[in-house]
Amino acid sequence: AGFPEGGDRSALPLQGCLNSLTGAVVARGTCQPDINGIQYFDIAVAALMAQPMDQGGGYPMNHVDTAVQIEQKFREFRASSERLVDSICKEYRALEQQAMHLETEIAQLDETNQRLKHDMRRQFPGFQPVASVRHSAQVHSVAVSKNSKLMASATWKGELIVWDLGNLKDPQKTHVFREWTWGKEMKGLYAAAFSQIHPSIVGCTSIDQNVYMWNYETRQCDVFGKDDKRPNGTSTGGHKDEVNGIDFHHLRPAMCTVSDDKTGLYWDYQQGKLVRKLVGHTKSVYSASFFGTDHGLQDSVATCAFDSKINVYDVRSGNITKSLEGHKDEIIGLDYCGRHRLLASGSDDGCIMTWDVRKWQKLHTIPLANNEVKRVRFSRDGQMLAASCAELSLGVVVYGNLGEATPRQMATLEGHKDAVFDVSWGETEDGRAILASGCHDYEARVWQEIDPRHGERMLRM
């Protein structure tokens, strides 16, 4: 309802002036009245005065009366609008205060809940096996979806299997992915992971130098790498050797993949675009980890390699911002915990190390004698760290007290008959942790945290 720049405002119809006047007094969505609204009154009066004069050369009395009435109504409307806006602002500020109080209370309740869970786990540590699912080949990777309702397992036979965890004691196979296009099958798979922002997408990496992105709802597959051919005949490029690991960004349609070609690749998987090549390792790169929702590290990703180093990259430039050293053998596993701001690494040197990313210093060294540590994962609440091991006597080891000087071994989960290569956490609706493990004995197992409130028998494993 504005006026053209330089236009003849006196020609504006009176009704239009009045509409503009009443519609512009209060700017919608703000707490300030439009004090320029008086200009619309002036224009309305000007429009009235532009009406034809009577024969005596004056304005008809009813026009003058109308102008006076408009002015009076406008003053009343403006005062009423200012009172309304002031009232709305007061209510808004009060709601803001209530929201802040609620956020504080929620944070306090969450902290109390974490303390209670910590104390309960200290008194009643333990997990029990609830399911075991057989595969036709070695299971090299497992992943639990963000909502903990699905599990994906990746095998050395080139099969990606999705399981429904609705009944933890009896997981149901819902999808088996192998042939990604007519006559072409995936080769042996190293790693699998669910997208953080697209729940129906699960990615996996292969010895055939490709990264496969499966939508298990549509059963469609997108390929990134050697065999990728886009509709326009171009290719995204990709790795030049076996692809070992994959991790998804928590807030963006992005992923990082790592390979025996000594590089990491940062992708925009939604656009099918290779964004950045990450170089600097001197041997095969095995795992990658983004930094969750940590605001200060949204543009960073960590990678670990057989050169015994952890590199942290800025994905905007591809530059290495930090390099962490301490392990004495190949580093296989890497994961990040936002609650404690810790990065954990697992190595064939038989040690788990945690690194404080606030100072980029090593915080813990946890030795596992005569063992090789494979992949490591933090629990969803950040209170526990699980490590998969090559040694049968350990299998899977779970640690707690991660924010303290010395982490405490909470449980050893035995039962697998070969090297356990991967672990992944989930959580039940009542807040208990679940843990999936993938093993070279052709099995994936599901373990559930024991809750003494439910009167369950505690099993030491």
Image (spheres, helix red, strand yellow):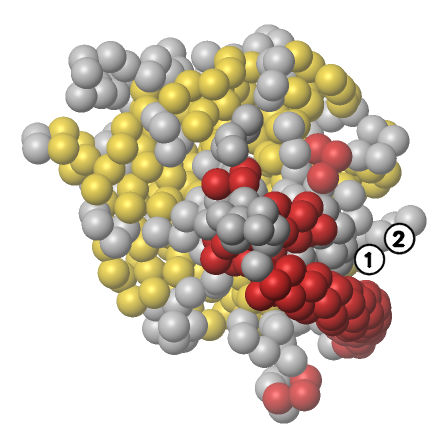
Residue 300 in sight from this viewpoint: yes
Instruction: List x then y, in percent, for residue 210.
Output: 32, 24
Placement of 206 over or under 422, stated as above or below: above
Looking at the image, the residue that sits furthest to the bottom is 455
What residue appears at the point 91 percent right and 49 percent down from the top-left corner? Answer: 405
What residue appears at the point 39 percent right and 16 percent down from the top-left corner? Answer: 239
Looking at the image, the residue that sits furthest to the left is 183
Q: Quadrant of the C terminus?
A: bottom right
Residue under label 1, please give it.
401
Instruction: List x then y, in percent, for residue 260.
Output: 46, 17
Q: Are marks 2 and 1 in contact (CB under 8 Å)?
A: yes
Nearer to the camera, 148 or 371: 148
Nearer to the camera, 167 or 359: 359
What residue appears at the point 84 percent right and 35 percent down from the top-left corner? Answer: 358
> Is 403 on the left or on the right of 387, as rendered?
right
Give the amino acid type for the residue marked by disc 2 in the picture.
Glu
Placement of 82 over or under 342, stated as above or below: below
Q: Quadrant of residue 391?
A: top right
| Mark identifier at residue 404 | 2
Instruction: List x then y, in percent, for residue 297.
Output: 70, 33
Nearer to the camera, 392 or 272: 272
* Secondary element at image label 2: loop
Give the amino acid type for the residue marked by disc 1 in the picture.
Asn
Looking at the image, the residue that sits furthest to the right is 405
Neighbor class of circle 1 (other Cα within 10 Å; few <14, some 14-19, many 20+) is some
| Mark identifier at residue 33 | none
Placement of 212 over or under 450, stated as above or below: above
> Is 313 on the left or on the right of 440, as rendered?
right
Looking at the image, the residue that sits furthest to the front is 56
> Is 382 on the left or on the right of 404, as rendered?
left
Instruction: List x then y, in percent, for residue 70.
Output: 65, 63
